[in-house]
Image (cartoon, rainbow, N blue to C red):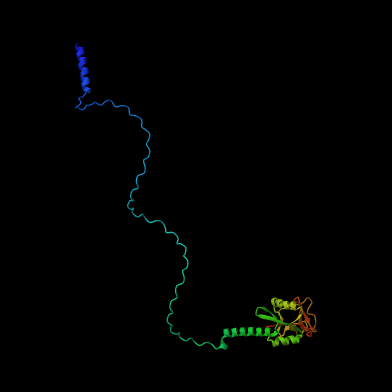
Amino acid sequence: MWLRSLAFTIIFLAVAHIMCDMNEVCIWSPGIPGTPGSHGLPGRDGRDGIKGDPGPPGPMGPPGGMPGPPGRDGLTGAPGVAGEHGEKGEPGERGPPGLPAYLDEELQSILHDFRHQILQSMGVLSLQGSMLTVGKKVFSTNGQSVNFDTIRETCTRAGGRIAIPRNPEENAAITSMVKKHNTYAYLGLTEGPTPGEFYYLDGEPVNYTNWYPGEPRGQGKERCVEMYTDGKWNDKNCLQYRLAICEF
């Protein structure tokens, strides 16, 4: 009997422990914590927020490396406006008197060359024929064929003399005229007292020759010299009619 009363009392206390009045706050005793659950899947990224205002500028950084090479030059600008003329300066001191013209060697040389060129031109014009220039020498012909003495007179009257080559270049120039007219030409040299020895018309010994093989062989009977169309020389008597070629 007493056991039943004890059991009832225990049950009553247990019920009273968990029961509460409507006007009271129920007080629970914490139980034993349970096992933590597993982590869920990560959620989606949120949307970008509104752009914020720019921050203040930072401090100036240190200077960079070496400066680069200079750029290309620009285009030249238009010329500027000409400035005003300055005032005329004072005349300089009078220089020392120059040499008289006849003592000035340089001036005399220039005048001599100028005079020579004038004479050359006048001589060529007087012949009214073709001309060739080799160095400072001018060769000209009127295309006429006459004897030696007439050629010498014609050239002297024109201010020149009978053409005589003194080197291969001049010989080639005279040869071209001989070929053009297809006529042999007398040259400005003659035989001296000794047969086979020839001299220029001023008496100087010949320093250039272009004899045909076996020539000269006139042995004093052919005192003049003619040029063939191939440029070779041959001694000949002076009475033949040959092309008149002068040099200036």
Give x and y (percent) for residue 1.
19, 10
Q: Is residue 91 left or right of residue 6?
A: right
Choose top left, top right, bottom left or bottom right for residue 246: bottom right
Give x and y (percent) for residue 152.
73, 86
Task: Farthest residue to the top: give it.
Answer: 1
Identify the residue at image location x=57%, y=85%. 107
Q: Is residue 72 left or right of residue 12?
A: right
Q: Quadrant of the C terminus?
A: bottom right
Identify the residue at image location x=67%, y=81%. 138
For the residue pair 112 and 42, the one nearer the viewer reads as 42
Relative to 115, does residue 55 appear above or below in the rendering? above
Relative to 41, does residue 18 appear above or below in the rendering? above
Identify the residue at image location x=21%, y=22%. 17
Q: Is residue 106 left or right of residue 184?
A: left
For the residue pair 192 and 154, the one nearer the viewer reads as 154
For the residue pair 181 and 1, the one nearer the viewer reads as 1
Give x and y (percent) for residue 74.
46, 65
Give x and y (percent) for residue 158.
69, 86
For the residue pair 95 and 7, the one nearer the viewer reads as 7
Choose top left, top right, bottom left or bottom right for residue 115: bottom right
Choose top left, top right, bottom left or bottom right for residue 156: bottom right
